[in-house]
Image (tube, helix red, strand yellow):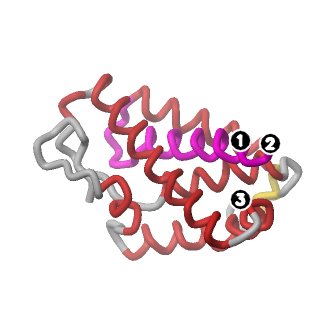
Amino acid sequence: MMWSPFCDNFMPFQLVTHQYLHASISHIFFNMLALYFLWDIVEKNMGNAKKMLIFYTLCGVGASIISSITTHILTPEFDMVPSLGASGSIFGLLGANYVYNKEAKLYIYFIIPVKMKYIFPILMGIELLGGILNTSDGVGHFAHFGGGLCGLLLSRYIKK
């Protein structure tokens, strides 16, 4: 679990370790399913698995930092709510897939094909809106948005 850096319980290592913990079997199942489908394109563009693991972890760290800062600014009462999961890193992979192959298709519900150039901006907008509206649905919308932003920026930097 990761506590916000703005609370007393925070330990710096939590920026990394929280992304390898999950709330339930379905939480880890869907994150790992997404990881399975998104990893290959990014790894091919990065060159090897070691760089890919560093990229994946950095996206999770960036997601945590962005989520903590935005949550602290908009809703400081939620600083004490722990977060966990790999969703920020998964959104980072979505951002990298967007950079490396905008024409790649993501299948919604395994049936409806949508090109990455459309689905990534839509998903980012949904997560940003969800975070701003503060739906209190237990979803780390700003972590998702932050991971996607980190993935987008890091992969553009690496691509150059």
Q: Is residue 37 left or right of residue 75?
A: right
> In the rendered structure, does residue 140 fall within the stretch colored magenta?
yes
- Of labels 1 and 3, earlier in sequence is 3
Q: CA distance from mark 2 to mark 1?
A: 5 Å
Residue 134, compared with residue 137, is above or below; it is: above
- Amino acid bearing label 1: Tyr
Q: Is residue 35 left or right of residue 37?
A: left
- Residue 52: percent from left, percent from top: 63, 64
Q: Which residues are magenta?
A: 134-160
Residue 73, compared with residue 27, is above or below; it is: above
User: Regarding mark 1 in the picture, which secondary structure is present there?
Assistant: helix
> In the rendered structure, does residue 141 fall within the stretch colored magenta?
yes
- Amino acid bearing label 3: Ile
The residue drawn where x is 29% and y is 57% is: 13
- Amino acid bearing label 2: Lys
**Residue 160 tag number:** 2
**Residue 157 tag number:** 1
The residue drawn where x is 51% and y is 53% is: 58
Which quadrant is home to the N terminus? Answer: bottom left
The residue under label 3 is: 108
The residue drawn where x is 42% and y is 36% is: 66
Q: Is disc 2 in contact with disc 1, using a CB cutoff of under 8 Å?
A: yes
Q: Is residue 58 left or right of residue 152?
A: left
